[in-house]
Amino acid sequence: MLTYLIIIVVLALLFDFINGFHDTANAIATSISTRALSPRVAIIMAATLNFVGAMVSSKVAKTVGGSIANPAKIENGVEIVIAALLAAIIWNLLTWYLSIPSSSSHTLLGALAGAVIAGAGVHSVNWDGFTQIIIILLLSPIIAFGLGYLIMVLIKYIVIWSGNTSRSKLNRMFRTLQIISAGLLSYSHGGNDAQKAMGIIVFGLVAAGVQTDLNVPLWVKIAAALAMGLGTSIGGWRIIKTVSGKIVKIEPINGFASDLTSSIVIQFSTFIGKPLSTTHVISSAIIGTGSVLRFHDVQWGTVGRMLITWIITIPISIALAFSIYFVLFRLIF
C-alpha cells in the first residue's frame, strides 16, 4: 500500500507539473503576444503567482476529492487513482505535442470517472456530483465568451467617450494594464488548477485509510503548488503560439479584456469550490473580446479544431482510464 501511495503522489505531482507547462499559455499568451511582457519575465511572474494562488484555498480540491466518488467507501480506490493519473498524463502530453490547448480539468475528471467505473463499477460513480462538475465545465466557456464580449464593448465605448483614440497611446496604456491583468490571471489559474492535483492526492490518502476526511494537508498544498510553479517556469511554447496568434490577433486592449474576463470567471468558480477548465475559459474570452474588434479575423478553423478536442476529451479520458485500469490491475497485477 505504501508503494502505491508513493506512486500516486509522484504521478499527481507529475500531472501538476505537466499542467503547469501545458497551461502556461493561459496566463501569459496575451501579454507576450502584445509585448507587454517579455517571455522570460512573463513566465517567472506566472510561475510565482501560480504558486501563491495554489496555496490560498482548498475548496476545489475537496470537490475533486469527493464529488465523483466517495474515496472512503470505494473499492480499489488506490488503484483507481493510479489509472486515472496515468490516463490524464498521457492525454495532456499528446495534446501538448499536437499544440492543442485542451483541458487538463476535463482530462483528469473524465479519467477519474473512467477508472472508478473500471475498478468499482458504474454504481460507484456519484453521477449527481459528476454531472454538476460537467455543467460548470460546459457553462464556464460560454459565460467567458459572453462576458468577454460585453467587457470589450464596454471598454471600447469608454475609450470612444473619453476621446482618447490615439492607437499608440491606447497601446501603451493597455500594455501597462496587461501586466496587472496577467498577474491576476496567473494567481487565479494557480488557485483553481493546482487544487485538482491536491484533490486527487487526498482521494488516494482517504482510499488508503491514511486520513478520514477531505482536508488537504499542508505538505500536499506545498508540493502541488511547487510542482505547478516549476511546470509553469518551463514554458509551453507550442500552446502559447496557438493561443496568442492562431485564434485572433491580440492587441493590448483585447488582451487586457481577455485576462480580466478570465480572472473574474475563474475566481468566482474557485470561490464556490468548483473546478473549471482555465484553458477553455481563457480561449473563449479571447474569442469573445476578439469578436468585438474584428469578428471576420477570428480563425474559426482553429476554433473549430479546439472545440472538437474539448468535446472528445472527457469520453476519451474515460475510455483511456478504463483501459489502463483493466490492463494494469486485471491482466497484469
Image (spheres, helix red, strand yellow):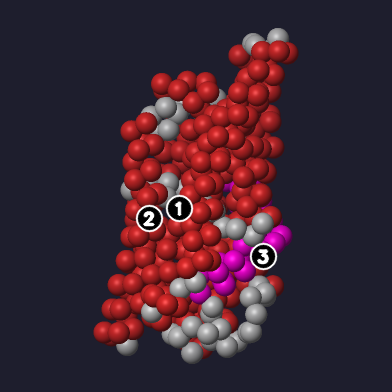
Q: Which residue is mark 2?
A: 313
* Residue 322, percent from left and from top: 34, 72
Q: Residue 89 in the image: x percent, y percent?
A: 41, 64
Mark 1 → mark 2, Cα distance in angstroms: 8 Å
For label 3, count other residues whose C-alpha is less than 10 Å away and answer few (under 14), some (14-19) or many (20+): many
Query: In the rendering, at what x and y percent does residue 32 appear?
Result: 54, 35
Looking at the rendered structure, which numbered label has been put on residue 103?
Answer: 1
Magenta stretch holds residue 28: no
Query: How far apart are labels 1 and 3 at the CA level?
Result: 20 Å
Residue 329 falls left or right of residue 144: left
Name the kind of residue labelled 3 in the image.
Ser
> Which one is earlier in the sequence, the residue at label 1 or at label 3?
3
Q: Which residue position holds label 3?
A: 58
Q: With respect to residue 95, does 260 lie above or below?
A: above
Labels 1 and 2: the sequence-earlier one: 1
Magenta range is: 40-69
Q: Is residue 201 visible?
A: no
Q: Are marks 1 and 3 in contact (CB under 8 Å)?
A: no
